[in-house]
Image (tube, grey):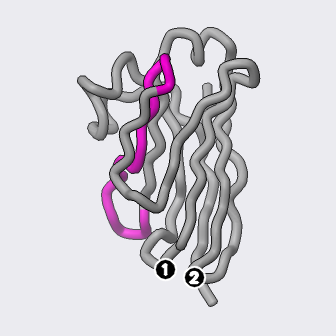
Amino acid sequence: YLVESGGGLVQPGGSLKLSCKGSEDTFEYYAIGWFRQAPGKEREGISCVSIRGSATNYDGRFTISRDAAKSTVYLQMNSLKSEDTGIYYCAATSSCWNHFPNPDSFRSWGQGTQVTVSS
């Protein structure tokens, strides 16, 4: 399973960098997506990175990247807004192209990391 970290409390306009760490097998064979679940809302896809590092971003403020040597995928979040508040999850899929942003097509969900954007 994947393990997220890096969440916390940040002021509007600030930045955070989330990490998603898994096993070597997971990162060798699967694409990784980041999702956000805001209070009372459905889980929504933010970004996905393929096995080869090709990124699909739904928000220009966020940048996904992967470091195969560390079996880690990162989500750099800039210019954060209050509506970015939520629990952020990473999960694995066979293909971003075929499956992102449908969360039902992802597996190995982590426990999530809380991001709160507030002054």
In the image, is 88 to the left or to the right of 3? left
Question: What residue is shown at x 40% (from left), y 58% (from top)?
Answer: 60
Query: Which residues fall within the magenta stretch?
Result: 38-53
Question: Which amino acid, by three-letter code, is at mark 2?
Answer: Pro
In the image, is 94 to the left or to the right of 27? left
Q: Which of the two residues, 77 or 92, is positioned nearer the viewer here? A: 77
Q: Position of residue 97 (x, y in %)?
A: 27, 26
Q: Is residue 1 visible?
A: yes
Q: Position of residue 58 (x, y in %)?
A: 34, 51
Q: Is residue 12 above or below residue 47?
A: below
Mark 2 surroundings: few (<14), some (14-19) or many (≥20) residues within 10 A: some
Q: Most extreme residue toward the left, as rendered?
A: 98
Question: What residue is shown at x 70% (from left), y 66% (from top)?
Answer: 8
Disc 2, SS: loop
Q: Which of the two residues, 77 or 101, is positioned nearer the viewer here? A: 77
Q: Which of the two residues, 2 or 11, is positioned nearer the viewer here? A: 11
Q: Position of residue 25 (x, y in %)?
A: 62, 9
Q: Which mark is residue 46?
A: none
Question: Which amino acid, by three-letter code, is at mark 1?
Answer: Ser
Quarter where residue 3 is shown? top right
In the image, is 70 to the left or to the right of 112? right
Disc 1, SS: helix
Provide the residue designation for mark 1: 82
Mark 1 surroundings: few (<14), some (14-19) or many (≥20) residues within 10 A: some
